[in-house]
Amino acid sequence: MKKINILLNTYTEQLDGWSNSLGNLESTDFGEFNKIQISDLKDDSYFILPISCGGLHRYLDILDRGGSGGKTFLYFLDDRVRNLICEGNGYILIIYIHEGHIQHQNYKDLHNELLKYQIPANKVFFVSSNISGKKQYKNFCDKMPTLTKFKINIIEVNHMLESSVEIYKQVLDNNYNTDLDELLPYKQSFVNKQDLDDMRDMIREKYFLSYNRVIREYRLALIAMIYEMGLPDKGIISLGAREVDTAFGGVWPDYISDFIEDKKQNEIVSDAVKKIKLLYPIDADGDIDANWVYRDGERWGGAVGQWSNFSHQYKRIYFNVVTESCYYEDCIYMSEKVFKPISNLVPFIIVSNPFFLAKLREIGFKTFSPWIDESYDEETNNDKRFFMILDEVKRLCNMTKKEIHKWYYEMEDILIYNQDHFANYKLQDHKKVWNEITEIMYG
């Protein structure tokens, strides 16, 4: 395998929002890279210019947030490097591996920016955790054939699965920064097989768990309707965090506008959303604040995130209502949220894009039909899928505690299989990315 030249330290300006680095694609699995400077760059070199994006609330943040007037990384690019990308053997690698919430507008903005600087789109690699990225980008290209005469090279990864596996192993081995345990409500821990045996004759306190940190309309709608149906006492629910919502653009709407097109249904849901506004923010059963936590003035993340593995909560419930990071778009992004119930031996209902569960099964996990009616996963109408999910939550919550306890243990083999498959999942993203890149670069 040929070594890849990685062009670093290209930019002399102080930039904010993205970086000229490999970021989460820094890897020893693939082998050593040739990390070079502009002074080392020869005209016939094969090289990659890496751009690591940031800014969840901006989605695909390739703009400088400093004093440049909102210029992209292409504006600051050295003319010689730009020419070698346009006409030589240089490529741009856009790294958005930590996120997968991609919209068609992101592709459009990127294509238009490339056109402005006369860079062929086929000289660009775009890596993200949108595991439906190739299909989504094809849909975009079909709609905009003139703009996409040259096509970006889309590479799909499942970064949050792999990083969740690594965190799981670190916690089990007690090989993590345990200072977190002093800042967060509980020590990092996971439900295990012995716990299932120990709790076999113990009726659990609640029916379901649903964490909802950043405000989005489908999350608001879901929690509002859970309250409207009289079910909040059956769940451990969180909704919103003022500091996080301010940073990530979470805004409480006056009415639901992103979906629920039927006027009568929209009025019902919008009225329900208004009713719970006074409750905002809702902490998970009053004991987990989803805001960021600080130590000596330094932000250490939050109690809802990759480092919020609290088996205490999962031992109290029978199923998890997971509101993923996407709902309306045609991307499929598996964040850490879905891997929390898997690693804690709990079945789940997914509030996300259609075919999310189908993708989970493709990578070896099992889902929960017929115990859970998962027909919602095949419903492409966002409104219908939403109400199908609500119906299933209501059906499960209408079971007696004795019935749902029996229901839970009927799935024990699936729960254990999923946790084992998760724990033994082979990390492959980095190798996959660099293999795809070298295949295209060197033919």
Image: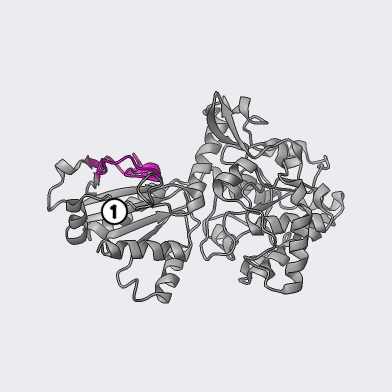
Q: Residue at x 37, y 51 (%)?
A: 69
The residue where tag 1 is placed is 75
Q: What percent of the width, then of the height, locates residue 330?
A: 52, 66
Circle 1 packing at 10 Å, graded few (<14), some (14-19), many (20+), is some
Q: Nearer the viewer, residue 301 or 356?
A: 301
Q: Nearer the viewer, residue 275 or 435?
A: 275
Q: Residue at x 76, y 46 (%)?
A: 279
Q: What percent of the width, then of the height, locates residue 23?
A: 38, 42
Can the viewer see residue 274 in this picture?
A: yes
Tell me, yes or no, whether the highlighted magenta stretch contains residue 220.
Answer: no
Q: Is residue 143 left or right of residue 42?
A: right
Q: Residue at x 60, y 46 (%)?
A: 245
Q: Amino acid at mark 1?
A: Tyr
Q: Is residue 128 left or right of residue 395?
A: left
| Magenta-highlighted residues | 7-35
> Within the image, what quadrant is residue 313 found in?
top right
Q: What percent of the width, then of the height, locates residue 10?
A: 24, 44
Q: Nearer the viewer, residue 254 or 391?
A: 254
What's the magenta bit mostly, secondary-structure-wise? loop
Q: Secondary structure at mark 1?
A: loop
Tell me, yes or no, whether the highlighted magenta stretch contains residue 33.
Answer: yes
Can the viewer see residue 46 in this picture?
A: no
Q: How many callouts does the rendering have?
A: 1
